[in-house]
Image (cartoon, grey):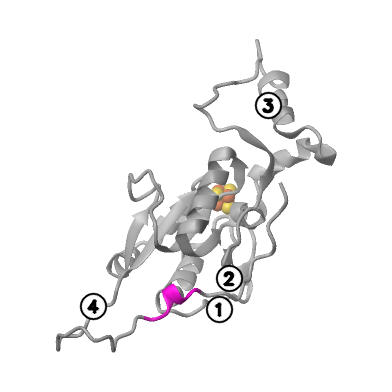
């Protein structure tokens, strides 16, 4: 797979601009600000980034007033990624065909995609298996051979369930290698404070200030 061009890190979509409070509504009552449609997605990750999102604690109540959570593995049972999403936090690397399909789908349906956590930003832990893909040779077969045959206690054999289990990609990719992303949010996991410092400005139509150790340190 050919990596996608580097994303434009300065792009902030119109859709997250502050709502137009002067819009004519035909009523003298102030118009309610539209709630942004927020999603979170889980690719090849351990769910630790989502656990950190839940650590937002009381800020979750603030978010509940300001966003509509339209897709999330930790907060809904919606199976299909919806259309017209404003912001999506994407945890995890791209390691199998299901990850790749969801990444492409969410990019097509989301205005602002955040590469959420070190696995999404660098491939991190899931990317360790790329070490078995030496010189571009080996690929997924080498991973399966090592895991299910060489390290098996007894009767090792390759798992094979076409149509049931997504096929491994030969290489694990960071998110930006397969789709353009709009913002990187590093950390393993990113702290709740870092998540808050990213989301709150976005809700106000501003780009978060990403500077200093507290916002940018990996790990
Ligand atoms: S970045 Fe860390 S916490 Fe987040 S999914 Fe990867 S390993 Fe888990």
- Check whether the beta carbons of the residues at disc 2 and disc 1 lie within 8 A of each other: yes
Q: Quadrant of residue 157?
A: top right
Which is closer to the viewer, label 3 or label 1? 3
User: For residue 209, which numbered disc appears in the image?
Assistant: 1
Residue span colored magenta: 13-18
- Label 2 Cα neighbours within 10 Å, binned few <14 / some 14-19 / many ≥20: many
Q: Quadrant of the C terminus?
A: bottom right
Can you identify the residue that label 3 sits on? Answer: 144
Q: Position of residue 130 (x, y in %)?
A: 73, 41
Q: Position of residue 152 (x, y in %)?
A: 67, 18
Is residue 44 visible in the rendered image? The answer is: no
Which comes before the other along the chain, label 4 or label 3?
A: 4
Measured in 3D between alpha carbons, the distance from the residue under mark 1 to the one under mark 4, in whole angstroms, is: 27 Å
Which comes before the other along the chain, label 2 or label 1?
A: 1
Q: Residue at x 78, y 32 (%)?
A: 138
In the image, taking residue 167 as reference, residue 56 lies left or right, namely: left
Q: Secondary structure at mark 2?
A: helix
Q: Secondary structure at mark 3?
A: helix
Which is closer to the viewer, label 2 or label 4? 4
In the image, taking residue 113 as reference, residue 152 lies left or right, namely: right
Q: Image height check: is 98 above or below 39?
A: above
Measured in 3D between alpha carbons, the distance from the residue under mark 3 to the one under mark 2, in whole angstroms, is: 37 Å
Q: Position of residue 19 (x, y in %)?
A: 35, 80
Which comes before the other along the chain, label 3 or label 1?
A: 3
Measured in 3D between alpha carbons, the distance from the residue under mark 2 to the one under mark 1, in whole angstroms, is: 8 Å
Can you identify the residue that label 4 sits on? Answer: 32
Q: Residue at x 20, y 83 (%)?
A: 25
User: For residue 215, which numbered disc appears in the image?
Assistant: 2
Which is closer to the viewer, label 3 or label 2? 3
Q: Image height check: is 144 above or below 174?
A: above
């Amino acid at each position: 797979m050919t990596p996608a061009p580097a994303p434009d890190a300065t792009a902030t979509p119109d859709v997250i601009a502050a709502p137009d409070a002067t819009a004519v509504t035909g009523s003298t009552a102030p118009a309610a600000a539209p709630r942004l449609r927020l999603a979170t997605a889980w690719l090849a990750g351990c769910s630790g980034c989502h656990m950190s999102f839940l650590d937002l604690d009381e800020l979750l109540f603030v978010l509940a007033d300001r966003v509509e959570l339209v897709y999330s593995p930790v907060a809904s049972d919606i199976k299909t990624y919806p259309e017209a999403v404003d912001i999506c936090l994407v945890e995890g690397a791209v390691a199998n065909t299901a990850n790749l399909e969801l990444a492409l789908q969410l990019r097509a349906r989301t205005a602002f995609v955040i590469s959420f956590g070190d696995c999404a930003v660098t491939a991190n832990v899931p990317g360790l298996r790329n070490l078995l893909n030496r010189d571009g040779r080996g690929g997924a077969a080498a991973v399966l051979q090592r895991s299910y045959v060489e390290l098996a206690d007894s009767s090792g054999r390759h798992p094979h369930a076409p149509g049931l289990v997504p096929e491994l990609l030969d290489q694990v990719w960071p998110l930006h290698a397969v789709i353009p992303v709009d913002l990187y949010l590093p950390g393993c996991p990113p702290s709740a404070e870092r998540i808050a410092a990213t989301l709150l400005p976005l809700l106000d139509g501003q780009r978060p200030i990403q500077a200093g150790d507290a916002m940018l340190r990996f790990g």
